[in-house]
Image (cartoon, rainbow, N blue to C red):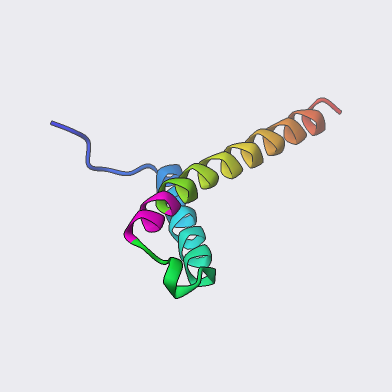
Amino acid sequence: MPNDKQTVLEGIVEDVGIELYQKVWNAISKEDQTEESSKALAINSRDTAVFVIQRFMDKFNDAAEELKDK
């Protein structure tokens, strides 16, 4: 049986991906808002959210390690 519970990080990634999708979708002209562009944007938005959040976490953890070592 699969685990239906979402981690906090998964929830944040999902929320940020949705917000990014909506921001970009609203900026696209109506004639370019197609099902195909929506699908591509949804994938790109989630991938971008994962990338940005992961990079932030990496940088944050690196900075915390540097402070801890001082």
Residue numbers of the magenta segment:
35-41
* Residue extending farthest left: 1
The residue sitting at 64% across, 37% down in the picture is 55
Overall secondary structure of the magenta stretch? helix
In front here: 15 or 26? 26
User: As rendered, which of 11 and 51 lies closer to the eye?
Assistant: 51
Q: Is residue 11 left or right of residue 58?
A: left
Magenta stretch encompasses residue 36: yes
Q: Which quadrant holds the C terminus?
A: top right
Q: Position of residue 14 (x, y in %)?
A: 41, 51
Above or below, 69 relative to 54: above
> 61 or 67: which is nearer to us?
61
Horizontal side of residue 67 vs 45, given as left or right: right
Q: Quadrant of the N terminus?
A: top left
Q: Residue furthest right?
A: 70
* Pick the front one: 5 or 70: 5
Q: Residue at x 22, y 36 (%)?
A: 3
Q: Is residue 15 above or below residue 53?
A: below
Q: Residue furthest front?
A: 31
Q: Position of residue 67 (x, y in %)?
A: 81, 33
Viewed as shown, does residue 22 lie left or right of 5? right
Q: Position of residue 60 (x, y in %)?
A: 69, 39
Task: Count the labels in the image.
Answer: 0
Farthest top residue in view: 69
Tell me where residue 56 appears, x and y as whole percent. Answer: 65, 42
Determine whether 24 is above or below 7 in the image.
Answer: below
Which residue does the image show at 42% across and 46% down from the upper left?
A: 43
Residue 54 in magenta stretch: no
